[in-house]
Image: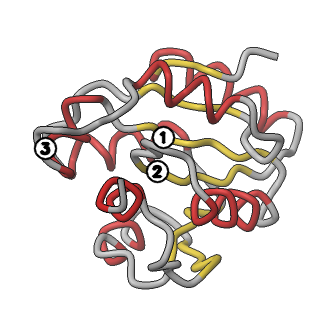
Amino acid sequence: MKKIINVGELKKLVKQLKTDDKSIVLVGGCFDILHKGHLVFLAKAKKQGDVLFVALESDENVQRLKGKERPINNQGERAANLSNLDSVDYIILLPVLASNTDYADLTKKLSPDIIAITEGDPKQAEKESQGKVVVVTKHLADFSTTKILQNL
């Protein structure tokens, strides 16, 4: 099974999954340096449905969100790391998305049954306008890529 896909491949794949009566869970993020917080979050998200999609931010968006020194790993490397996790079924390589409308359009194409988030997600309200949101774990403040980098 090909795990790493682009946005153009979504429509056909989603149609097949829906035909097979599979429930779709969506998560999104940078996943720059995989750590325990990511692993816990992804495992709990996977338990919410049959198929877990990770919408993986572009390098440009990671830099905009996290700063000019990021990402540490480029999108291809981050996708390859995620593809080795049993909890992850598909990784969507996001292009540069400039607005909330772009994210909403992607979510509409995917039509997830669940959008899984961590407690305190700053974009929770936006995500709730796009589908059923489930908080799957508390924010694990001790585990973050930023904290890892600060401790180097």
Q: Are marks 1 and 2 in contact (CB under 8 Å)?
A: yes
Instruction: Label 2, secondary structure: give it.
Output: strand
The mark that comes first in sequence, 2 or 3, is: 2
Instruction: Label 3, secondary structure: give it.
Output: helix
Residue 55: assigned label: 1
Tell me: residue 125, above or below residue 20. Answer: below
Q: Which residue is mark 2?
A: 28
Quarter occupied by residue 14? top right
Instruction: Label 1, secondary structure: give it.
Output: strand
On the rendered structure, is 144 left or right of 34? left
The mark that comes first in sequence, 1 or 3, is: 1
On the rendered structure, is 143 left or right of 94? right
Q: Are marks 2 and 3 in contact (CB under 8 Å)?
A: no
For the residue pair 86 and 49, the one nearer the viewer reads as 86
The Cα atoms of the two marked residues, 1 and 2, are separated by 4 Å
Q: Which residue is mark 3?
A: 64
Q: Are marks 1 and 3 in contact (CB under 8 Å)?
A: no
Residue occupying the point 74% across, 31% down = 84
> Residue 65 location, x and y as percent?
19, 51
> Residue 38 location, x and y as percent?
58, 58
> Residue 123 location, x and y as percent?
30, 70
The Cα atoms of the two marked residues, 2 and 3, are separated by 16 Å
The mark that comes first in sequence, 1 or 2, is: 2
> Residue 138 location, x and y as percent?
56, 84
Q: Amino acid at mark 1?
A: Ala
